Amino acid sequence: MGLEPSLEIEAKKASGDVYNKIDKYTKLTHAAFYSGGNIEEKSTISSPNEQKKLLQRSEREIVELLLPAYNRTHSANYAIDANQPIEYDSTDVKVIDKTIGHSEEVQVTISDGNAMQNLGRNKGRLERKGESNALVQAALDKAIKKKLSYPKEARQNLILALDGWRTVKPNNLDYYREKQQQFMADSGFKEIWFVGCADETILRLFP
């Protein structure tokens, strides 16, 4: 795509895990430092005008990443349906089981709207720190609540796929899944999945 590289390197001397990510689009750099249950993260986009393209994956891409794990969970053979719903429907992507012909509907949304908004307000820079489970819970609660505007009868037939923020770890998702089962049940969605940036963070949160 002809994007110019922009790389920031940050070194820390302390105990803990360091996560460094240079996106496939090299105008984005992302780093996080983990210490115990806390996280300190920093994102930089050298071209803020391209923020959405750099950070928000397409709905179809999210569903393509979701399907292998979804099919394993359900012993199924779903693929993206050639016949998609009309634009602005509650369904973003329709999938169909190529073996039995049964279809499912997927609604896709970003998992951490606060991070995205902060990047927009701060000219492509995000710096934050805090207790990682608390940050993840607040973000996922907000993302799910945002979709409660859909009628209950629509939600009960929808799979909600959360476009996963890149520093979320499996243990954060395990914590959320254990703590927020009732909240997710009350939301009325058929299933809720987190679709992270690595295989280990593509997980079903509910049921």
Image (cartoon, rainbow, N blue to C red):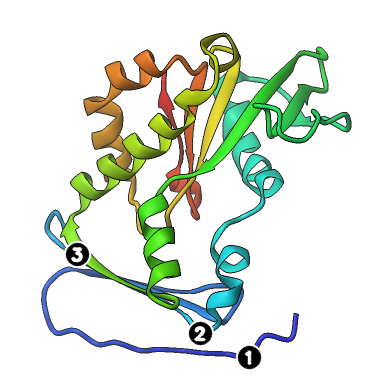
Res. 4 mark? 1
Res. 152 mark? none
- Tell me how far mark 1 sits from mark 2, CA to CA: 9 Å
Marks 1 and 2 close (CB-CB < 8 Å): yes
At horizontal 74% and vertical 86% (from top left) the residue drawn is 2
Q: Tell me the amino acid under the disc marked 1.
A: Glu
Measured from the top left, where is residue 73 in percent x and y? 55, 24
At horizontal 50% and vertical 55% (from top left) the residue drawn is 197
- Per the image, label 3 sits on a secondary structure element best described as strand
- Tell me how far mark 2 sits from mark 3, CA to CA: 21 Å
Q: Tell me the amino acid under the disc marked 3.
A: Lys
Q: Is residue 145 above or below residue 18?
A: above
Measured from the top left, where is residue 116 in percent x and y? 44, 60
Q: Is residue 97 above or below residue 113?
A: above
At horizontal 46% and vertical 89% (from top left) the residue drawn is 7
Q: Residues within 10 Å of mark 3 (few under 14, many from 20)?
A: some
Q: Residues within 10 Å of mark 2 (few under 14, many from 20)?
A: some
Marks 3 and 1 close (CB-CB < 8 Å): no
* Extreme-right residue of the structure: 82
For disc 3, the marked residue is 129
Q: Tell me the amino acid under the disc marked 2.
A: Ser
- Per the image, label 2 sits on a secondary structure element best described as loop
